[in-house]
Amino acid sequence: AQKVTQAQTEISVVEKEDVTLDCVYETRDTTYYLFWYKQPPSGELVFLIRRNSFDEQNEISGRYSWNFQKSTSSFNFTITASQVVDSAVYFCALSEAGRGSTLGRLYFGRGTQLTVWP
Amino acid sequence: DTAVSQTPKYLVTQMGNDKSIKCEQNLGHDTMYWYKQDSKKFLKIMFSYNNKELIINETVPNRFSPKSPDKAHLNLHINSLELGDSAVYFCASSQDIAGGADTQYFGPGTRLTVL
């Protein structure tokens, strides 16, 4: 079963629109960590944010904000006033505080391709 | 200074060849990883090493062999390359592996094309 689901495969918006990327996760652990990464057309993976399961406070960083809701197992990412440079594939990922071979394993969603048109 | 570097960035080779991808991190991290990103962009872990000890060994063909000469380096050697090995391979590192808490920082990726 997929531990991280990003149901939106592709999203297209016009510059200055707000856009929300959805992420739903599944885990039995009470301690876990959620991440968002950005993969621009150049191909590298850029870390954006990490959240632990005990911290449900929303986070805002400039035009980016994240909404973590344990009740719905969601960790959604909103870009306000999108720009062309935001065009990228965005990945949500989960790490569980497991043992043995699960240690440090990042489970990635399949990514959402965001295209921002001028 | 690049935190996690990989060489080469592009690798084009013939089926049946043996090739290696090198990874180095200068972050002082204890843990390093290899991930494979397929043509549909799906990322999946292959291996992880913590202080030169193999921790995660995902179900990959044994033609893939990681080697960690020291905790700053994790190389990936691939024998008898097959068409299906074509992908982008990412190296990553994190401070530690304990509890999955630490952020993994990724290298720029190596695009492997097998002809």
Image: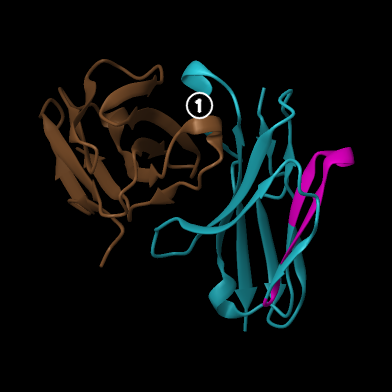
Chain colours: A cyan, B brown
Q: Residue visible at 18% across and 47% down? A: B11
Q: Which residues are magenta?
A: A62-76
Q: Residue visible at 69% across and 32% down? A: A31
**Closest to the observer, B16 or B19:** B19
Q: Is residue B105 magenta?
A: no
A41 lies above or below B36: below
Mark 1 secondary-structure assignment: loop
Specify the farthest residue to the right.
Answer: A71
- Please indicate, yes or no, whether residue A36 appears anywhere in the rendered image: yes
Q: Looking at numbered disc 1 in the image, what kind of residue is underneath it?
A: Leu
Quarter holding the N terminus of chain A is top right
- Which residue is under mark 1? A103
Could you tell me residue A21's position as x and y percent?
72, 57
Left or right of A26? Residue B80 is: left
**Closest to the observer, A44 or B30:** B30
Could you tell me residue B110's position as x and y percent?
27, 48
Specify the farthest residue to the left.
Answer: B17
Could you tell me residue B60's position as x and y percent?
35, 20
- Please indicate, yes or no, whether residue A105 appears anywhere in the rendered image: no
**Closest to the observer, A20 or B97:** B97
Q: Is residue A64 magenta?
A: yes
How packed mark 1 is, by other alpha carbons closer than 10 Å (few <14, some 14-19, many 20 or more), is many
Quarter holding the C terminus of chain A is bottom right
